[in-house]
Every structure is written in C-alpha cells, then in structure tokens.
Amino acid sequence: MSAHPGVRTSVDELIGELAARRYLADRPLATVLTVALRLGRPLLLEGEAGVGKTQLAKTLADVLGARLIRLQCYEGIDVSHALYDWNYAKQMLHIRTLEAAHAADRRATAELFSREFLVRRPLLEAIEHADAVAPVLLIDEVDRADDEFEAFLLELLSDFQVTIPELGTVQAGIPPSVILTSNRTRELHDALRRRCLYFWIAHPSLEQEVAIVRARIPGVAERLARQAGQFVASMRGLDLVKAPGVAETLDWVEAIEMFGVDDLETELTEWTLGALLKHREDVEQVTERGVAGLVEAARAAAGG
Ligand SMILES: Nc1ncnc2c1ncn2[C@@H]1O[C@H](COP(=O)(O)OP(=O)(O)OP(=O)(O)O)[C@@H](O)[C@H]1O
Ligand SMILES: [Mg+2]
C-alpha cells in the first residue's frame, strides 16, 4: 500500500497541531501516530474508557483537513451495515414502475443492482472517496463486533479493495488513514493486530490530566484542576468496578464549577460523585472510605 502523500507532519508539529485543537497527546502517542500516517498503516488504540481514543481520531481529521468517516461497531454488525446495502424500497418502486409499463424484462431488472440503488456505508465511503485529502476512517470499538466481522476487516485493511458481486471490484485511490479503537471487552485476533501499529493509551499522569482539564475547560482555576486531578488519581488507585477516565474528570470539574466553587470541598464532592463513578459498588466503596479524608488528601497533595 502506498504511503499518504499528503502526510508530512513531524512528531512535534503533530503535538502542536493537536494541542491547538485542545487535544494533548504525549510524545509516544504522537510518535506512533506519525509513523502510522507516514507508512499508511492502521493504528490500533486500546485503553480504558474515556482516555481519549475516539477524540484523537476526530481531532486528527481536523488537523489533516480530512473528512472523518466513523464506523461504530456493535455486536451483530455486518457487511450490509458497514460496507454497502441495496435500497430495497427504491428497488421495489422501480420494479412496480417497470411492471406497470410491462417493461420488467431481464435487462431492466438487472438495473436494480446498479449504483443508483446502492447505499454506501462508511467503509465503502472511505474506500471510494474523491476527497483531495484522504479521509480518516475511525473504526470505533472494534472489540464489540464479532469474529467474522473482524476477519472481514482484516481483508479490507490489507488491500483497501472490496468486491461487490453485482458491480465488480472497488479499490481505494489514496487509502484512508485508519484508526481502530478497542476497550478490550474481548481480545482481538493476532492477525488483525499484525496489520496495525499498536498503542495503549493509559490514564494520563497528574500533570497531563491537569493540562487537559485546563485546555478543555477554559478559565478553570488551576488549584481546582490540580485538586480534582489528585482526587481522581486516588480514585484510580482503588479497586473500582470502573475507574474514572479523563472524560469523567472533565464532567466532574464542570459540575463543580457550575456551583461557582473553585476549591474542592467534601459536601459538593459527595453530591457530584455521580459524574465520576457509575456503579453503586464504587460509590459505596468511596463513601465507606470517607469522602472527607479523600478530599483532604487531594487538597494537601495539590498544595492547598
Ligand atoms: N488527551 C486528551 N486531550 C484532550 N482531551 C481529552 C484527552 N483525553 C480525553 N479527552 C477528553 O475526554 C473525552 C472522552 O474521550 P473519548 O470519548 O475520546 O474517550 P474514549 O477513549 O474513546 O472512551 P470510550 O472507550 O468510552 O469510547 C473527550 O471528548 C475529550 O474531551
Ligand atoms: Mg470512544
């Protein structure tokens, strides 16, 4: 597969361009992304929920000036949802019209499987694009799709070509830049992993999370961002069903700010825990440990 001629970004430029769009990528992530773009290889991003996997693909499309084409995977997704389908209603109408005109001969019915009746789904859109800049194809939450679909993707990602029996083979001119994401609800096969470059997005460091909060919530008090970062980091150290991700930190800080508060306090933290924790067991565990103590520790660690 050919490299993407339009993609000449250096790692530093990419970090800068992403940051200008309020996405903070660390150097290892920006490096693997740059390499993937240069080589024209798909990038598989794994990581906990809310660590910025989907957002990276969206922001990247913006950086490249490319269209984002998103395929959201789910259990039972198949070719007719992902690649193409036929517009049955339109075909039926066409048949009726032909019948009424006594013109429903073999040639006329063959027309039913022409481009006029083809419904292009995201993968076909990404392969057949006529964009000046190749689109970014986001295959989101690929772990939710089942094995057969994964095998189909493998083939597609190998040569960016598909065969529609009625129409023939369609091949990408400039292949899309592909990002796959997975929450690891099941293991992906080695064959698919081998096609891709791989990166595990971990929860951010405290400094990075504070920087993300400040980038995403303009005007937030630095002290609050830091206290919140500390508090969330301590949550991640507990044995929770679901540790909060960056998305949850942002929701939580926004919730606190709504009350005009810029200094972490126990009562408001108790009331707004639902922005961070999404399981009854987790709320119970944190409450049993004592929110006051956790808040105090976060305030002390943040230096105020
Ligand atoms: N590095 C980052 N820089 C800026 N914002 C970030 C970053 N990481 C996460 N975010 C914020 O967190 C939000 C959630 O991220 P996103 O939806 O991309 O997570 P995800 O990893 O795809 O989660 P899920 O697995 O639940 O789909 C984003 O909309 C963004 O606001
Ligand atoms: Mg996502």
Image (spheres, rainbow, N blue to C red):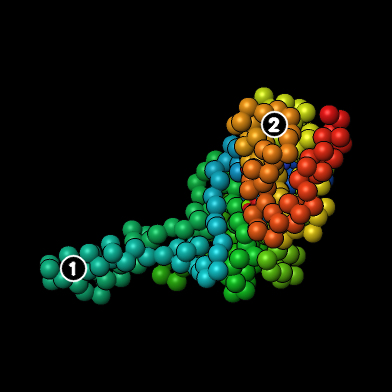
Residue in front for this viewpoint, 289 or 26: 289
Residue in the picture at 73% in, 51% down? 287
Amino acid type at mark 2:
Ala
Residue in front for this viewpoint, 47 or 273: 273
Question: Which quarter of the figure is the C terminus placed in?
Answer: top right
For residue 178, say whether it is visible. Answer: no
Residue in front for this viewpoint, 63 or 258: 258
Classify residue 37 as left or right of residue 68.
Answer: right
Residue in the picture at 12% in, 68% down? 100
Residue in the picture at 70% in, 28% down? 262
Spot occupied by residue 201 in the image (x, y as percentages of width and height): 76, 51
Spot occupied by residue 122 in the image (x, y as percentages of width and height): 50, 56
Question: Which quarter of the figure is the N terminus placed in?
Answer: bottom right
Question: How many labels sit on residues?
Answer: 2
Foreground disc of the pair 2, 1: 2
Name the disc covering residue 96, or none: 1
- Residue 88 figure quarter: bottom left
The local secondary structure at tag 1 comes to helix
Spot occupied by residue 228 in the image (x, y as percentages of width and height): 75, 38
In the image, residue 174 sits, relative to residue 220, either above or below, namely below
Spot occupied by residue 65 in the image (x, y as percentages of width and height): 59, 37
Question: Is the residue indicated by label 2 positioned so its CB lies within 8 Å of ligand 1?
Answer: yes
Residue in the picture at 64% in, 46% down? 275
Name the disc covering residue 192, or none: none
Q: Which residue is mark 2?
A: 215
In the image, residue 235 sits, relative to residue 145, either above or below, namely above
In the image, residue 29 sits, relative to residue 12, either above or below, namely below
Which tag, 2 or 1, sits closer to the chain's start?
1
Label 2 – label 1 distance at C-alpha: 58 Å
For residue 160, say whether it is visible. Answer: yes
Badge 2: how crowded within 10 Å, few (<14), some, or many (20+)?
some
- Residue 230 figure quarter: top right
